[in-house]
Image: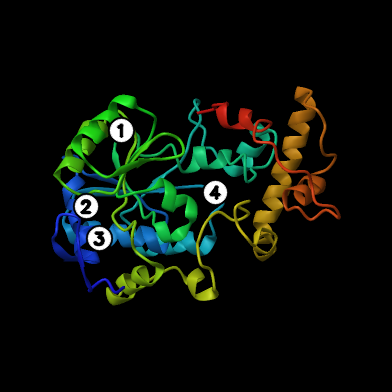
Amino acid sequence: MSLGQITITSDGEMLTKLDMALNRLRLFCPPEGYYVAFSGGKDSQCVYHLCKMAGVKFDAHYNVTSVDPPELIRFIRKNYPDVIWDYPRDRDGKVITMWNLIPRKQMPPTRLARYCCAYFKESSGKGRVTVTGVRWAESTNRAHNQGVAVFQGKSKSLEKQVQESGMQYKLSKNGGIILNDDNDDARRMVEQCYRTRKTLVNPIVDWTDEEVWEFLNGGGYEHCELYDKGKKRLGCIGCPMGTCQAQELEEYPKYKENYLKAFDRMLKNNEARGVKKTWNTAEEVYRWWLRIEDQEPEEEDENEFSKYWTEDIM
């Protein structure tokens, strides 16, 4: 479907998808404005420019991960100079990077122990209504756990309120409330909740990849060069959720070198702490991490890794 094609909303209005996205932003905007989660990728570019088109108040923030591609960093600096760069910090004010986080956590981030996301991505925008570029088309998980508006955290009283309002909703896997309505009842629910729990607004949640590119190209907005080199999604170099982790690290040898140095510091710290020895060298850690041993490693145990989620250094 093209962004210009007419669709009928739950309220019976005839609007285009572009109109619906703009209406969502205008509907849920709080007096102090939105916190826009900006990564430099195509989806966050869309919500940034949609906020401008909608005329809503907002400030865009890029969370510095220390492992984003240099091409992406240059692109943000050049094309979005007004975006605020947020550096994660520990209790002592020291900047947290992947290179000092791995030794603290005693292991590399993995598919189950994705502790890095909690420090680099998920702690931002507290007490704000956060706009994201999350879309259902990106993954089955997001299709199940995201909507037009999302209230994170379990709450029986909140669920009762939503039920009594008659709004369309479902529960996320963590018990949060997912709304797929964008009407006055949903707006009031956002107003009631955003100061007490993390509230997300996803204006392009129902857009396809093609519609995202239609919006960017039609508006004449530049995009990061990595898309032209075949990248479908932009993210942290070496992310264990990626499908080309090993190849990516070979393309960015400096990052590979930094990971190996971090693994070496991790092993020395683990030895000093008396942590049970799993690896002997940084190279062994690297091979295990990329799953390139001769034999497939054992499946990760989520309970084994739970401590890496709960330990807090912030």
Picture residue at 26% right of the left edge, 71% below the top: 3
* Residue nearer the viewer, 199 or 136: 136
Between discs 4 and 1, the one toward the N terminus: 4
User: From the viewer's perspective, is the residue at label 4 or at label 2 nearer?
Assistant: 2
User: From the viewer's perspective, is the residue at label 3 or at label 2 nearer?
Assistant: 2
As drawn, 30 above or below 90: below
Give the label on residue 50, or none: 3
Between discs 3 and 2, the one toward the N terminus: 2
Residue 180 placed where, x, y %?
A: 29, 49
Picture residue at 23% right of the left edge, 30% below the top: 161
Picture residue at 21% right of the left edge, 42% below the top: 186
As drawn, 199 above or below 1: above
Find the distance from the CA under tag 3 to the CA under tag 1.
22 Å
Type of the residue with mark 1: Gly
Tell me the crowding category of disc 4: few under 14, some 14 to 19, or many 20 or more residues within 10 angstroms, Cα based: some
Between discs 1 and 2, the one toward the N terminus: 2
Type of the residue with mark 2: Leu
Check if mark 3's residue and mark 2's residue have beta carbons within 8 Å.
yes
Residue under pointer 2: 25
Type of the residue with mark 3: Leu
Q: Can residue 40 be seen in this view?
A: no
Type of the residue with mark 4: Ser
SS of the residue under disc 4: loop
SS of the residue under disc 3: helix
